[in-house]
Amino acid sequence: MLKKTFTLLVALLVLLFTPLAQAAPKIENWTTANGLRVYYVHAPELPMLDLSLMFDAGSARDGDKPGLAMLTSAMLNKGAAELNEDQLAEQFDAIGAVFGAGSSMDNASVSLRTITLEKEQKAALDLWLKVLSKPTFPPESFARVQKLTLVGLQAEKQDPATLGSKAFYKALYPDHPYGQPENGTEDSIQGLAVADLQAFYQQYYVAKNGLLTLVGAVERKQAEALAEQIAAVLPTGEAAAPIPEVKPLTAAKTVKIPYPSSQAHILVGQIGNKRGDPDYFTLYMGNQMLGGSGFTSRLMKEVRDARGLSYSVYSYFAPYKELGVFEVGLQTKKEQTEEALKVVRDEISKFQQDGSTAEELEASKKDITGGFPLRTASNSQIANYVGVIAFYNLPLDYLETFTDKINVLTREQIADAFTRRIQPDKMVTVIVGEESETKPADDASKPKDDAQEASQPAAQGK
Amino acid sequence: MRKIQPFTGKARNSRTMLAASFLFAAILGSPAQAIERVKVEVPVHQYKLDNGLKILVKQDKRAPIAVMQLWYKVGSSYEHGGITGVSHVLEHMMFKGTEKHPTGEFNRIIAENGAQDNAFTGSDYTAYYQIIAADRLEVAMELESDRMRNLTLPPAEFKKEVEVVKEERRWRTEDKPQALTREQFEAIAFMNSPYQNPIIGWMPDLDAMKVEDLKAWYERWYAPNNATLVVVGDVDPDKIHELAKKYYGPLKPTENIAPPKPQTEVEQKGLRTINVKAPAELPYLLMGYKVPGMINAKEKWEPYALEMLAGVLDGGGSSRFSRELIRGKAIASEASAWYSGYGRMPELFSLSGTPTKGEKLETIKAALLEQIERVKKEPVTTEELERVRAGIIAGEIYERDSQQHQANLLGSLETVGLGYKLADEYVDNILAITPEQIQAVARKYLIEDHLTIAELDPQPIDPNKPKNEPRFVR
């Protein structure tokens, strides 16, 4: 749910947009009477339905209260209408429905998965609407959620990967909301009050600031009725104002965080691109060859295959509403830190200066286009990318046109984009695990995300 | 590298499995259940080649893709002392070339076809998979069949790859205090069962590993008569059979593959405890009771009752742990219960917990033990059971959304020796479990003499801080 996981999600979603005409699911779109945008995909094969409401209510809206968006989202199912937290959990579980709520930098989502038997679907929807429209934010639950968040912050301090990721974002976004920790700091979490959450909820969880996605075994007519029913419980409200623009760094920066681990966790990167960016396709394609494609990428070949320096090594662009990150990551035993860093830096520079080979580009195009049907094989996958298309206002034919956009790219275009957008001499480097005589940086004492095993974007098995 | 547990798994709402296709869906009402069950029959097509290769095919036509997996009956529980981790290192080396497709070619060809591929090693299996456009499946089968018998294992590649595996071990275990605790916990929970060894292997064994160890391991276990091919997706079963005949058919079987020795775990004679010190912020508790597995249960229903018990304690937001320990008393930031009973040997019923801010590990331990005493003393309520059943019934549908899950289930069941048909019986059997049966297994198996407890004792992360006071251990 937090930054790292969302980053990964976005990175995966990038891969999704590589269609084959017959396999692209058909996305239908309309707006309800009170201004809620609706995106619907009919998936009749399994008797289940996935609903998700997304609001422009991510941590970028935290202001001077880091953690506000996340805790607001976490509190929704802690009490609603006449039901307390135990009752809500019991009632969802009793009909096999799965409630979800989470937030990222850009957005917050409230989801429901239910089977589509009439009785169960209706019960699940009624319950979900209560949570959406009448959360009670009980103070005793809030005190507990605060405590759990503090434990989460503490857990991050024993996870060098998270320490590194938090320091990386902080260094890349010194003056932008993206640089603030999504799960707050000990001080900010303790400083939050129920009234803050209620105000945040009232301002941002409204029809004009949200959108609904439906994927599953309901017909269009039924979907329209559902959408009206859902929209009806939301106040019309206003769309949130744009968040500030991101300024790229003007000088290189290195952050070293001492940690008693056997490996150093290394991140190198800079400000990247955004959704709908004119360089989106060229950067995506170039990165595939540099470090995005897994086992055939240059970084994997040079760092892992040729030298045995790391189990996982990757690079990706994580585009957000505003400029996101370009990140290269790996882990290696401490004594090899300098050697591994040099290989990574050399490969970035080489790619930035000389670009790709014709063979690489050809192979990469085949990889992306040939793999398209894999990305939309399940309802979960479909629901994920419909959410991205909807939230970032991408064209509905984004899927159908993606392959064409990939296939026409040239080496020159990619090289041009990397020359303009990548600055090897102005990158942030974060090393967690290096010995240091200095005191731990601020970053070490104010870490960001939950310890998540799944936070490693590179391949796991082999 | 990871371990698949076909039915359990800590993810909420995913503790069931699926056995179904929308093709033959029929709604069966049942007044005894909280929600209706949408029962579906999807046939699994089974074939066997003359050389002993088993083939399981299941259709899922929702998308033009196929998941293809090859499962070998070998994993860390087959390994003897000194070579722990060899199955997993070999798994890595399976990507390093054959005579026909030298180092690098496998990855190149797979990528050229837009396939996703990887492999995983568990205690009881090593499996390789590709997810690929259904009409390109033959390319992947050619590659997979080729490396069953023709691996070259170049020493220079091994030398680098074993270093990659050591980095993997540092990343997965050495620098993760909870993973480290789990590894040491398993090492003492099992006294002579090979489940005592980590799948990734002990570091000194990795240090001493030789390419010859891999070669011997490969020759011993990698044969068509020690493997199962599983395909789930938009495919024609008979056509898969034909393709398998073409590519795997010519491979010679290995005569007389000796199965691993029984190594049946000796009876535990009293509580075992272990204290693990590691740089960490939070304490962590891990407990496990010796219980029968599906493979050796004398009473067929007992594993299902243990699985249901785990569901009552930790299945969803309304489970006892969520309701009473995380909310309610609000002493735990995390508390879990799970049953690992689907291996080729019996394993554990496990509990874990992390205290919330201001609480002690002792408090969590006492609360978890109290929960166990309670399920022994009084039967679980009908309402609780109905909620777990609802999760299983709905989960049966939700899990059909993943082709990979379906393939994992068939492959793992067949490979550990339980048989893929268990997938068809599972839901019926678990829905039949009664509160009395849950109470009975709790009383019979969750006893202190068969319990192992591990505690993570956090040491300061900041090297400038003083060490913790010595801690008195029982």
Image (cartoon, coloured by chain):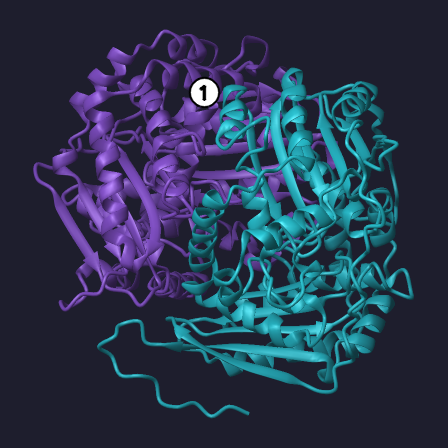
Q: Is residue B292 left or right of residue A396?
A: right
User: Regarding mark 1 in the picture, which secondary structure is present there?
Assistant: loop
Say which chain is purple.
A
Say which chain is cyan.
B
Nearer-the-camera pick, B311 or A456: A456
Nearer-the-camera pick, A379 or B249: B249
The residue drawn where x is 83% and y is 65% is B435
Residue B327: tell me if it is visible: no
Q: Amino acid at mark 1?
A: Phe
Q: Image height check: is A338 above or below A414?
A: below
Q: Which residue is mark 1?
A: A17
The residue drawn where x is 35% and y is 51% is A331
Residue A115 picture quarter = top right
Q: For mark 1, name the chain.
A: A
Q: Image height check: is B43 above or below A456?
A: above
Image coords of residue A376 (percent x, y): 56, 23
Of all residues, the one furthest to the left in this rendering is A250
Q: Image height check: is B280 above or below B391?
A: below
Image coords of residue A61 (percent x, y): 27, 41
Image coords of residue A337 (percent x, y): 26, 53
Nearer-the-camera pick, A79 or B275: B275
Of all residues, the one furthest to the right in this rendering is B299
The residue drawn where x is 73% and y is 66% is B347
Q: How many marks?
A: 1
For the C terminus of chain B, the quadrant is bottom right
Residue A149: tell me if it is visible: yes
Label 1 crowd bin: few (<14), some (14–19), many (20+), radius 10 Å: many
Image coords of residue B184 (percent x, y): 55, 72
